[in-house]
């Protein structure tokens, strides 16, 4: 009987210990550190930028971005009818992932330029770079502070490496310093693969940045299609056929939240279009030091 009472007493005490209310958590301490936030002086220029970034992940071949006229095209809504002239930039970043393990063909990306006028147009490549994620510029973790040297650049990802080249005014050998487009002529400024055959998982990306100047109007299109064979890139004629007959490559990215809206959930959507502004130029001064920022 005594053993039973002791066991009962222990059980009741144990239950009471389990169900005892926990202590009220202390209110979090709010630490305020005032600091001055100043707007950056200067302004964004109005240089038009061909911005090809939707879809980031290419699911089907097609038109990524086209500023060609819509007249005569099989899918008119896939074209913006905007001609570049004088200074303009091109940015393109896209990723390809092979969904079928038995089909590891490369997805090719092209940038097609066209002279619609009746006179020759001179196109100057001021700077330009195009890199793959693998093996050119893998994403790696960088330390908080990195010293920069043009002779030993440090980068994480193809966009990082391409921008580093452009900030130094470099032009890769795949881009000609100048080219002349005859009236009505088209030219492949870029025709490069996104290879996945040797990768596990089979996914890769390519980032391209180009600064240009044209003496007259030019239309630009970025396009995607499979390689016919691994040793043969699509031809100019094949790209022109795709431009004339295909629709937009899919799936398109989500529509971004308008900057004026303040919803509870903000959607960051990648875009395909022509934006105004390539560089922000300002002078930041303190004491006798002056720093000119161009980005």
Image (cartoon, rainbow, N blue to C red):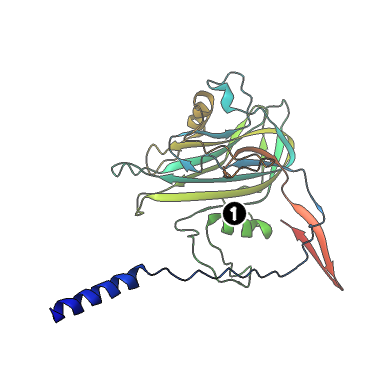
Picture coordinates of residue 39 (x, y %)? 79, 57
For the residue labelled by badge 1, is the local secondary structure a helix, a strand or a loop?
Answer: loop
* Number of numbered discs: 1
The residue nearer to you, when weighing 11 against 185, is: 11
Looking at the picture, tell me which residue is in the foreground, 240 or 53. 53
Residue lying furthest right: 288
Determine the image quadrant of residue 82: top right
Residue at position x 63%, y 30% in the image:
185
Residue extending furthest toward the top: 72
In percent of width and height, residue 51 lies at: 62, 42
Q: Which residue is mark 1?
A: 172
Estimate the x, y position of residue 156 in percent, counting from the top left: 53, 62
Query: Is residue 247 positioned above or below 279 on the image?
Result: above
- The one nearer the camera, 68 or 285, is 285
Residue shown at 39%/36% (left/top)?
228
Residue occupying the point 54% across, 22% down:
75
Residue under the point 56% across and 21% down: 73
Quadrant of res 292: bottom right
Q: Is residue 277 above or below residue 26?
A: above
- Position of 3 compared to 173: left or right? left
Front residue of this view, candidates 285 and 123: 285
Q: Is residue 50 above or below residue 31?
A: above
- Relative placement, left or right, of 44 versus 75 is right
């Amino acid at each position: 009987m005594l053993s039973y009472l002791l066991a009962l007493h222990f059980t009741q005490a144990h239950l009471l210990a389990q169900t005892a209310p926990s202590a009220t958590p202390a209110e979090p301490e709010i630490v305020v550190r005032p600091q001055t936030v100043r707007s950056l002086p200067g302004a964004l220029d109005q240089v038009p930028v061909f911005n090809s970034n939707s879809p980031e992940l290419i699911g089907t071949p097609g038109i990524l971005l086209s500023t060609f006229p819509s007249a005569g095209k099989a899918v008119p809504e896939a074209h913006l009818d905007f001609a570049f002239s004088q200074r303009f930039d091109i940015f393109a970043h896209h990723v390809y992932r092979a969904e079928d393990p038995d089909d590891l063909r490369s997805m090719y990306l092209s940038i097609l330029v066209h002279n619609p006028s009746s006179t020759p147009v001179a196109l100057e490549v001021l700077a330009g770079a195009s890199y793959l994620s693998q093996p050119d510029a893998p994403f790696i973790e960088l330390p908080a502070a990195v010293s920069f040297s043009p002779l030993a650049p440090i980068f994480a990802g193809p966009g990082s490496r391409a921008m580093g080249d452009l900030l130094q005014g470099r032009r890769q050998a795949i881009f000609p310093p100048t080219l002349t487009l005859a009236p009505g002529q088209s030219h492949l400024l870029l025709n490069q693969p996104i290879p996945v055959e040797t990768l596990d998982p089979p996914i890769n990306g390519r980032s391209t940045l180009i600064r240009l100047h044209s003496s007259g109007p030019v239309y630009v299109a970025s396009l995607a299609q499979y390689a016919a064979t691994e040793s043969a890139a699509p031809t100019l004629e094949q790209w022109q056929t795709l431009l004339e007959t295909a629709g937009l490559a899919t799936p398109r990215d989500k529509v971004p939240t308008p900057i004026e809206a303040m919803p509870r959930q903000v959607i960051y959507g990648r875009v395909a279009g022509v934006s105004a502004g390539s560089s922000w130029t300002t002078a930041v001064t303190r004491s006798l030091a002056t720093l000119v920022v161009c980005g």
